[in-house]
Image: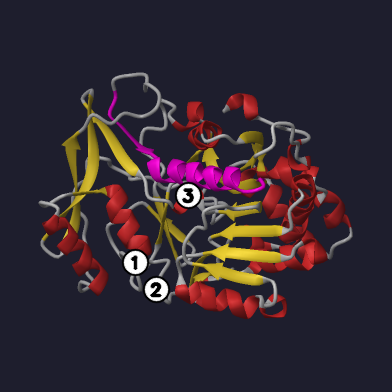
Amino acid sequence: MDPRHPGKPPYTFGDNRRVSTPNSHPPSELTLRIHQAITQAGGWIGFDRFMAMALYEPGMGYYTNSLQKFGAMPSSGSDFVTAPGMSLLFGQTLAVQVSQALQATGTDEVWEFGAGTGALALQLLDSLGDAVRRYTIIDLSGTLRARQADTLLKHADKVRWLDAWPDAIEGVVVGNEVLDAMPVQLLQRTQGVWHERGVVSAGERFAWQDRLTDLRPPVDIEGKHDYLTEIHPQAEAFIASLAERLMAGRGGAAFFLDYGFPEAEYFHPQRHMGTVMCHQLHQADDNPLVAVGQKDITAHVNFTGVALAGQSAGLNVLGYTSQAWFLLNLGLAERMATASLAERSQAQRLINEHEMGELFKVIGFSTSADGSALGFARGDRSHRL
């Protein structure tokens, strides 16, 4: 299924030998900028650079332009809905874990990366009250920042935004659907030979082109069949940088919720078409080379790589489990029992196995070697990382 459009099947690249893509739209300033980057790079750029520009090019990329993006219905002009937008119970339940981690680390600041509309921040701040002295948001989008400020107006005395990371971070870090939006490199095995898949210009259009590479997936892929997959150096570097800053301060904890798999499932021989997909107007498609800047581009998270990046930088893994187990451990079922029928129906989507409950996972880190977290009390799958 598509995790942002429950009930839809997952979309992949389709025919992984397709190298051209139609585009009936006149070139935008963003596409012209990418074509220029391709020319300056000698005619080819890796998909990670293409994805970075498509999503984050200042003022033009999907997450830095003024498009609606977040919302429950396509009629609003939105492209997808995340868990905080589905149910207030999501943030209220997550607050139980954040509260425990604040107490365990002796800190009073929450940090959120990629805060979207500010819905999760509002739910956490409303729930945590005086336990939080300051709520820091690090977000690349100026337009989303303005929306967050409106959402969080009643907590304006506690909220701040940063453009860059400080040297040290103390407190509890949360990131909901952040890692999946970090640029990935594409690796394509064709007739037993590994290539890096990149993007070239084809007139006004973009096209795929593979180049020989020494890069490899972190594990050997059984079989001789053609195989497309991703590697995640930017997400792993992000976790390592976060770990360094947490270790540089008084310490803290971090929790990331996203869709993905452990390494053995991610690089399974049958998962031969990759996981990159796009979202626009609540529909998923498999072609990131069209409507550039107008739709989201994501890839599933390799949680083994994320865990190893944190551990290598000095963090301890608190646990790894499905979103369903995580929220149930924190009391979501009890909250649902006293909620209205409409609220229960929306919250059920967070834990249903065929919707977000199983595909979405949660990983937790701590600077403390003897830390524990309520969210991983049952159903911990750290041994499968």
| 237 sits to left or right of 383 | left
Q: Residue at x 27, y 57 (%)?
A: 289
Q: Amino acid at mark 2?
A: Asn
Image quadrant in which the C terminus is located: top right
| 333 sits to left or right of 308 | right
Q: Which residue is mark 3?
A: 180
Does the residue at mark 2 contact the one at mark 1 (Cβ under 8 Å)? Answer: yes
Please, what secondary structure does the residue beneath circle 3 have?
Answer: helix
Residue 248 painted magenta: yes
**In this rendering, does residue 205 appear at all?**
yes
Question: What segment carries the magenta color?
Answer: 225-251
Would you call the spot at circle 1 few (<14 residues within 10 Å), some (14-19), or many (20 or more)?
many
Above or below for 73 versus 239: below
Q: Residue at x 64, y 52 (%)?
A: 170
Q: Position of residue 135 (x, y in %)?
A: 66, 65
Q: Which residue is mark 1?
A: 293
